[in-house]
Image: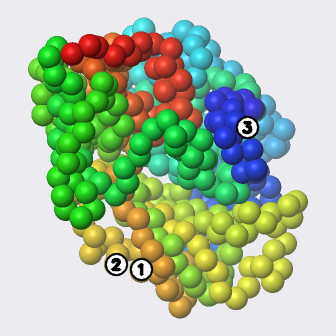
Amino acid sequence: NGVYGPIFDLLNEYDPTNEKFVWALNAPGYVKLLGESIGATDADPVSNLDYPHYYIRSIAMNAPPELQRNASVTQLQDLVRFQIGRYIGLHYAIFGKYSYGVPPPPKDWSLIDMTALEYLKKNNLTALEGALRFSQQQQGYGVLETIPAFYMLWWVHPDQLLKSSNVYSLRKGFQRLWTAVHAAHKNQYKTIFQANVTSVSRGNKWNKPRVTYQTRWGDLDTIEADHVVMAVDLSLYAGLVEDLSNEEKQLFQGGDYTASAFLTTLYESDASPVETASVGWFGRMQENGRVSAVRNSKLSYLFTNSTDWGDLAKGRQTNLAYQYYSHPLDKVNSTASKAQLDADLKLAGIKNVEVTTQLHTNYFPRFTPAGLKKGLLWKIWDIQGQRKTTWIGSSVSFESVLDVVVYNNNLIQYVNVTVPRY
């Protein structure tokens, strides 16, 4: 199970029929890349390379000059293995050895006080750039040119390189897993849906914490609690807590949070000129709002061992388009993003588009380089459980579902919640 063991443990316990399947990135024709990242023009809707050929091309372009001219595939693969070994050695030197999760503070910030791409270039690791364009960038964990190297080193832990680390999807979706976890404990907990929390107070030694919320009908109600778990995006909603201490204000409201935004659009259309499980334009990720990926879940779900899709890739198709922004959602111009979506789908030769639904969300809340160097990640960990509060979710760890689960598992071992007598 590699580093994804904590996720698969939950699946086995709560949702064993929700079969996982491999996102077959390295299968010929499964993922295709277009545009400037393969040497074509951005407006070319046909020229493409599948991921294995793109990857070899990227290695060759970033190889030493003597290898660029006439290197064999074997030589390029050897170069990657060598640079992976160097990457792992540097990782151990900077952080020491630790299990996947929040890294310990680096031993010397100057070694990583730069962007991810600057780090790769400084340490002669550029043969890894092509793989990171997918594993880091395309998943929304930051554009290599701008994301702090710390977040790349966090996500690309040595175990991701040394252990089996296939990209998995679930045939019934991740939401089904969380629904199953909730259903298994529904008699132990009361869940209130479709309610907006308006304020949180943690009380004092005489009073219990209180959470006030507005129901779907507009009524205000308040519940008392023994302990509050804040699982919201703290880059947006820390202010719901009306009695933040000065220390908490410095952690959550000191101007050191930032985030990205993902706009996803589910649409139907005629088959595109390059209809496959996933199509990407890696070079567009630096241009906020460009359609950088299109995914056909039907084809990825039905894939066996061949991408000779036949009639499956003909006629009307349902796809999901992704638009990425390196800044928070509140800075996204929705009118401009809609125009960019239409323009990019047209550039891709996708015709007769009918939009089914759209989701616009803050994504990957994280700390700025200044916030990282202040040690805010680790200071939040140090206050966990204090003032009858724990802070969880991606805004105190990392956007991936793996990180959120690992953080929670570690927190269960760290925080001992006691119920006070009032």
What residue is at 56 percent from the left and 50 percent from the top?
Answer: 179
Look at mark 3 in the image and give the residue it sits on. 12
Pinpoint residue 159: horizontal percent, then vertical percent. Answer: 66, 24
Evaluate if marks 2 and 1 touch, with contact meaning CB atoms under 8 Å apart: yes
**Can I make out residue 21 in this image?**
yes
Q: Which mark is residue 343?
A: 1
Give the Cα distance between marks 2 and 1. Answer: 6 Å
Give the Cα distance between marks 1 and 3. Answer: 44 Å
Q: Dot 2: within a 10 Å radius of its alpha carbon, few (fewer than 14), some, or many (20 or more) residues? A: few
Evaluate if marks 1 and 3 touch, with contact meaning CB atoms under 8 Å apart: no
Pinpoint residue 109: horizontal percent, then vertical percent. Answer: 36, 15
> Quarter of the image containing the N terminus?
top right
Along the viewing direction, whichever of 66 and 421 lies nearer the viewer: 421
Look at mark 2 in the image and give the residue it sits on. 339
Query: In the drawing, does residue 219 fall left or right of residue 292?
Result: left
Q: Amino acid at mark 2?
A: Ala
Q: Point out the residue furthest to the bottom here.
A: 352
Sequence-wise, which precedes: disc 1 or disc 3? 3
Q: Amino acid at mark 1?
A: Ala
Q: Amino acid at mark 3?
A: Asn
Along the viewing direction, whichever of 42 and 266 lies nearer the viewer: 266
